Amino acid sequence: MTVLCAGPERGGRDACQGDSGGPLVCPAGSGDNHWEVLGVTSWGKGCGRSWGNNSSRPPSRRGSPGVFTDVRLLLPWIKIKLREADEQKQGTPLSELCSVRDGRVTGSEGSLRNPALPGDHYNNNQLCVWSISVPPGNSVLLEFDHFDLESDPFCRYDRLMVSVGTRRPVGIFCGGVLPGPVLLKNSQHATLDFSTDVDRTGSGFAIRHRGVQGNSSQGCGTVVLVDDLTPVHSPNYPQCYSEDCVLRWVVHAPQGHIVKLEFSNFYLEESDRCLYDSLTVLGDVEGTEEIVVLCGGSVPPPVLSYHSVMVLHFTSDHSITHRGFSATLTFISHADLHSQDTSAQSGPEGQRGHTDQRHMAHAAVEP
């Protein structure tokens, strides 16, 4: 997903030895005076050698397109590094990367918008970073009034990332669906990174931010950060959860720990492959690492995260509802986990991996 290929199948145009790290550039638009860097030279087979009849050649004589790192996909990372370097050198943000005012935001409430005027479109090639702080004793709550970014299933191009501090992501948003509220529980600091690539734009976003006290209700459409051993449960538990509900928890364990999810009660609508109501346990905020999908009326066995992050994604459809689930979260150090695995002796190698755990969880809820 981070590379692109270039060059004609007949060969003849390619990068070669000594070009690694050099740019792949193309003219932008119809003019010849403006060029864009699209790739960074990575590797290939044979300098300019064709590859259309590779199957009939010995391996040493086969060719390939030129393989380049896709700069478009890495623009957010590139811009963050540029901004960090500029801040270290000058002590001020690299404001040229953002068309609206960004930076530090303090106070009990406020709003953020890009573009500045409703009805306009945001600019290409941007990086805007807001650092939000609310008064002590408050949690940050973000509420979206408008949202329209370039759509992509993996949010690789234009995207808004919400983090606690600067290193713990909670959500990555793109497309045209209005996100639900984002509650950063027990955190008075949040960082919003808005980055765009060099193609296509939208009408942007408008966000209200404020500090809230106490345990705000975890209603549908809310993303909740859980960074301590807080119990989690479906909305309205032990009463029935509502129809057409989506609720998401993001759990960050301390460094050197994983997350253990243990259920005390569980009853969601049962369906083949959990297509209707379900609780999906993920190993990352982006949603690319699915650990297990749960539904039905049996209490599942404990679920372990792959790393220090676990995401719980609860969803219900528009028909049958039940009482939902109640669970607790525990942080386990790698040393303690290794000790438990060794003592369990539950396999030929004395350990039980995450794959076995996933099969166990599915077996408990699927007929």
Image (tube, rainbow, N blue to C red):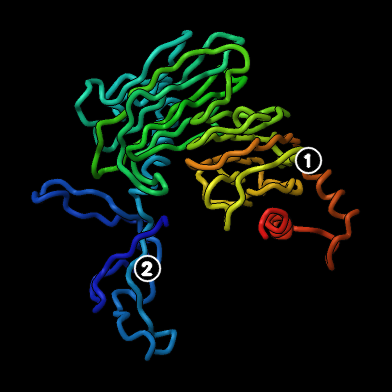
**Residue 42 or residue 232, whichever sits in front:** 232
Q: CA distance from mark 1 to mark 2?
A: 46 Å
Q: Which residue is mark 2?
A: 17
Residue at 72%, 54% in the rendered image: 364
| x and y percentages locating residue 40 in the rendered image | 35, 55
Q: Is residue 24 above or below residue 181?
A: below
- Residue 124: which quarter of the image? top left
- Does the residue at mark 1 contact the one at mark 2 (Cβ under 8 Å)? no
Direction from residue 299 to residue 251 in the image, left or right = left
**Residue 78 or residue 204, whichever sits in front:** 204
Residue 116 shows up from this direction: yes
Residue at 56%, 24% in the rendered image: 184
Direction from residue 332 to residue 243 in the image, left or right = left
| x and y percentages locating residue 183 in the rendered image | 53, 24
Residue at 63%, 35% in the rendered image: 251
Q: Secondary structure at mark 2?
A: loop
Identity of the residue furthest to the left in this view = 31
Residue at 72%, 36% in the rendered image: 327
- Residue 53: which quarter of the image? bottom left
In the image, what residue type sits under mark 2? Answer: Gln
Mark 2 crowd level (few <14, some 14–19, many ≥20, 10 Å Cα): few
Residue 257 shows up from this direction: no
Q: Quadrant of the C terminus?
A: bottom right
In the image, what residue type sits under mark 1? Answer: Ser
Q: Which mark is nearer the camera, 1 or 2?
A: 1
**Residue 139 or residue 307, whichever sits in front:** 139
Identity of the residue furthest to the front in this view = 320
- Residue 248: which quarter of the image? top right
Q: Quadrant of the N terminus?
A: bottom left
Please give the label number shown on residue 333.
1
